[in-house]
Amino acid sequence: MTERAVPQIPSVAVLPRRLPSLVWLVPIIAALIGVWLVAVTWLEKGPTITIRFGTAEGIEAGKTKIRYKEVDIGDVRAIGLSDDRKSVVVSAQLIKSARDLLAQDSKFFVVRPRISGGTVSGLSTLLSGAYIGIDPGSAHETSKSFVGLENPPVVTGDVPGREFNLHGEEIGSLDYGTPVFYRHINVGHVTRYSLDPNGTSVDVGVFVNAPYDRFVSSKTRFWHASGVDLSVDANGVKLSTESLASLVEGGVAFQDLPDLPSAGEPVSSATSFTLYPNRAQALRLPDQHGQRFVMYFPESVRGLNLGAPVDFRGIVIGEVRSLDVEYESGGGFIRFPVEIEVFPDRLRSRVRNGSAPRSYSRPQTKLIVDGLVAHGMRGELKTGNFLTGQLYIALDFYPEAARAAVDWSRDPPVVPTVPGGLGKIQDAVSRIAAKLDKVPLDRLSAELSQTLLSVDETLKSSRQLIGQLDSQVAPQATRTFNEAEQALRSANAVLGQDAPLQRDVQDALKQVAESARALAVLADYLERHPESLLRGKAKDPR
């Protein structure tokens, strides 16, 4: 058997590899890219902050953005409740470049559609949704935890201007964003308001934009310019408004005091001012050296209110301070003292070179008042407004008035007065009625009847005499006397006691007397109700 030959298998020489396989390059490159992306992300990652709000209305995690000047600088990552469950805590991630905006006094707020102070804001969020805005602060310290504002700031920190504090009795119609006017120009807004700790006044913050803030000085006055200022007083009906916009949204106005010898000094930001209720009170010059007097009026003081003006020939030199009642127990005499305060400085003299007004001391004031009263100056009640019946005190000269002097022994001194206009009319009508009542109508009628009877008897005697005359003269004389008798009978019929003329005369005299009494009643009614001249007599409630 023949053995089969085994073929020879070639051998391959395997050399060791000096380089790794290219397949491993892919995961290595992927790992390097991942590390690079992580490093870049970590290096570009901005700070994470927390903001506390009262409510999360309009805020959604992953959707709500944080914006500064309408540029996205971060987004909301999570929303949760605070530990006390009284607020919500919003966690937000910002970009790296926004790190400089996180000053300790930076302000965060939610921008939503809002109507405040007559202005509409945040309308763009109706489509895009609410977002969180930021107003960067100026502090050097930074922070990552903030308390958000419930209302967006009306003025952001990058707006040039200054903020001032106002203190007033009430807030009126002011609100966030209410405009501030200077000579009817909108120059700022109301930024805040709060109640003072004592609860007796309010604190209002206003921001005046540059360059108008330079018009605020130490002599500037602020007042309410809200809506319509309607005042009805002894000076009449006054209607004023700052602008058409203030009718809807109200406002605050300011202006320097007029007629001052020197300009006001510049003031710094956060300076406090008084917020007056209206323009008249704000721009009224400050009164000094006030002197109080007392007046006693013979008529009713109904319609004279506190604050009513004291007018001296068209110039208001004072006002009514109090109304009271005095009763003397011995004689039972009741008087109604009216205390007024007069400012003699308002009766000041000015020279043409514009020097300051002259102020009068108390001895000079006494000398001046005594001289005026000696020349007939008296106080009188006058009706300032027939619509409301309000009175004011007028000082004028009455040469016919009885001599009088100021009683300086009293405190306050007593100034003499004269009856008012309606009081004079009432006194005159009363005197006429009293004189008519004294006319003896019955006695005059009786005397007239006796006179007519005497004339009738005289005619009878004449007729007898005529019968004895000559027959030629008798017919003519008889005819004449007959005509005279007829005339006397006609007169007797007209002037007799029961004659119509007599009754008409008596009735006319009685009507005159009744008319005089009616005029007296009318004058008394007009004194108590002067407004009836315009509105008529009020209906009886029964």
Image (cartoon, helix red, strand yellow):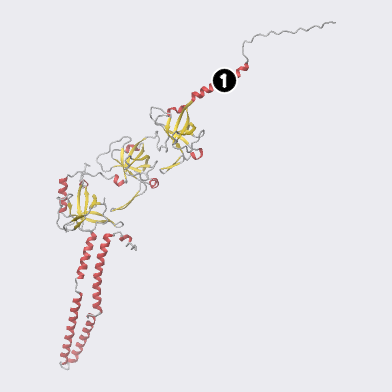
Along the line of sight, the residue nearer the viewer: 270 or 104: 104
Tell me if residue 45 comes above or below residue 533 in the rendering. above
Q: Residues within 10 Å of mark 1 (few under 14, many from 20)?
A: few
Q: Which residue is mark 1?
A: 31
Say which amino acid is labelled 1: Ala
Along the line of sight, the residue nearer the viewer: 208 or 127: 127
| Location of residue 448 in the rendering, given as x and y in whole percent from the top left corner | 19, 79
In the current view of this chain or complex, which residue is farthest to the right? 1
| Location of residue 104 in the rendering, given as x and y in whole percent from the top left corner | 40, 29
| Location of residue 458 in the rendering, given as x and y in whole percent from the top left corner | 16, 85
In the current view of this chain or complex, which residue is farthest to the top? 2
Quarter location, residue 461: bottom left
In this picture, residue 502 sits left or right of residue 224: left
Image quarter where the C terminus lies is: bottom left
Image quarter where the N terminus lies is: top right
| Location of residue 265 in the rendering, given as x and y in whole percent from the top left corner | 28, 36
Residue at position x 67%, y 9% in the image: 14
In the current view of this chain or complex, which residue is farthest to the bottom? 471
In this picture, residue 128 sits left or right of residue 455: right
In the rendered image, is residue 396 in sight? no
Q: Disc 1 on helix, strand or loop?
A: helix
